[in-house]
Amino acid sequence: MTMLSVSVRIYADGDGRAPVEVEALVDTGAIFTLLPRSILQSLGLESRGKQAFRTVDGKAIERDIGVAHVEVQGRRSSIPIPVIFGDPTDIPVLGVTALEILGFQFDPVRGELRPTEFLLLAVVAGRIVHPQEVL
């Protein structure tokens, strides 16, 4: 299995604070991004609730969740990305939701993130059509 670690810049939503940078493991099996609680709180980000999770070893846990803007390889999210407030022992993880919002896919052969093409599906008169057909 190819492991990839990337630099992630974390931003609060429009408050002018400088972003914080952290190395995170790319995990296409993780739905959410997990970042250190201390970093998220230093940016003024707050929990918006709790979410139940199951660890790899089957243990049930609960973590605070919130949202942040992130930037990877020069691509910054235009909408907030769901983030888990990690405990001090948690490894930072860049999850698949962030990858999809940022427009990346993981290439396991090359061991790198590659830009993806955003596709738009249109439904016209109950029929699925290619966007070019609508024009």
Image (spheres, rainbow, N blue to C red):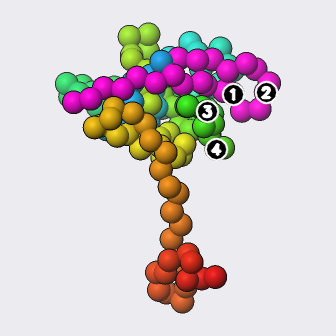
Read off the residue under disc 1: 12
Q: Are marks 1 and 2 in contact (CB under 8 Å)?
A: yes
* Distance in Å between CA atoms under marks 4 and 3: 15 Å
Q: Which numbered disc, 3 or 1, marks the residue closer to the eye?
A: 3
* Distance in Å between CA atoms under marks 1 and 2: 6 Å
Task: Judge from the rendering whether residue 25 lies leftward or rightward of residue 8; answer left or right.
Answer: left
User: Hey, which residue is sitting farthest right in the picture?
Assistant: 16
**Magenta residues, as a range?**
1-22
* Distance in Å between CA atoms under marks 2 and 4: 15 Å
Amino acid type assigned to the residue bearing label 3 in the image: Gly
Task: Judge from the rendering whether residue 6 lies leftward or rightward of residue 44; answer left or right.
Answer: left
Q: Secondary structure at mark 4?
A: loop
Residue shown at 33%/32% (left/top)?
A: 111
Residue shown at 53%/66% (left/top)?
A: 120
Q: Earlier in the sequence, mark 2 or mark 4?
A: 2
* Distance in Å between CA atoms under marks 2 and 3: 20 Å
The crowd level at tag 1 (other Cα within 10 Å; few <14, some 14-19, many 20+) is many
Q: Earlier in the sequence, mark 2 or mark 3?
A: 2
Q: Secondary structure at mark 3?
A: loop
Depth check: 47 or 39 in front? 39
* Distance in Å between CA atoms under marks 4 and 1: 11 Å
Amino acid type assigned to the residue bearing label 4 in the image: Ile
Read off the residue under disc 2: 15
The percent position of residue 64, horizontal first and vertical second, equals 49, 27
Read off the residue under disc 3: 74
Q: Quadrant of the N terminus?
A: top left
Depth check: 66 or 114 in front? 114
Q: Quadrant of the C terminus?
A: bottom right
Q: Which mark is residue 79?
A: 4
Q: Is residue 6 magenta?
A: yes
